[in-house]
Amino acid sequence: MRRLELPGRGSDMPRLNHQDIKLIRKIGIPGLKEQTREIVELKLREQPENDGQQTPKAGNPVYKAMHACRASSRRELSKAHRVPAGKELADNQVDSVVNLLMRWIVREYNFYIEEEDRQKNLSQF
């Protein structure tokens, strides 16, 4: 399967907050990747009856990633990434979605850390 495209960083896109960063630091990237796989399996593997309402918008960095990457429902996944809706996702499709979400989380984590460092440097003045 082709590599899914990572979205831009528009001002209307979700961002990681301090709580998300604390969670990432607590469980680590490997732990978060496992959690991401579990969430994708639960929410997206099969076509849910409540497609479009199964993913909360907050509470976990994975949910924010799903909304930012337009992977919060099978309908969104189909429109944005041409992953067919209506049938169960194959293992390689689940892997692609997990990798997309993890790339977004790591990118946003790095932006957060970079901004945090910039703010610390400003306090020297």
Image (cartoon, helix red, strand yellow):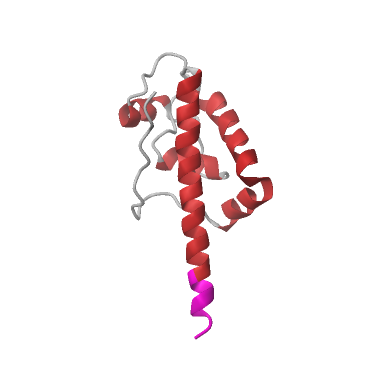
Which image quadrant: the N terminus? top left
- Residue 5: give x, y in percent of width and height: 35, 37
Outermost residue toward the bottom? 125
- Residue 82: give x, y in percent of width and height: 32, 25
On the picture, is 121 further left or further right than 85?
A: right
Q: Quadrant of residue 83?
A: top left
Q: Nearer the viewer, residue 102 or 56?
A: 102
Query: Residue 111 lies in magenta, yes or no?
Result: no
- Residue 86: give x, y in percent of width and height: 40, 15
- Residue 7: give x, y in percent of width and height: 35, 43
Q: Nearer the viewer, residue 29 or 65?
A: 29
Disc tally is 0
Residues in magenta, as a range: 118-125
Look at 50% across and 40% down and name the residue there.
102
**Helix, strand or loop for the magenta stretch, by majority:** helix
Can residue 9 be seen? yes
Look at 35% across and 25% down and name the residue there.
78
Can residue 50 be seen? no
Look at 31% across and 28% down and name the residue there.
79
Outermost residue toward the top? 87
Look at 68% across and 50% down and name the residue there.
26
Vertical placement of 81 versus 18: above or below?
Answer: above
Outermost residue toward the front? 2
Vertical placement of 12 versus 60: above or below?
Answer: below
Query: Residue 119 lies in magenta, yes or no?
Result: yes
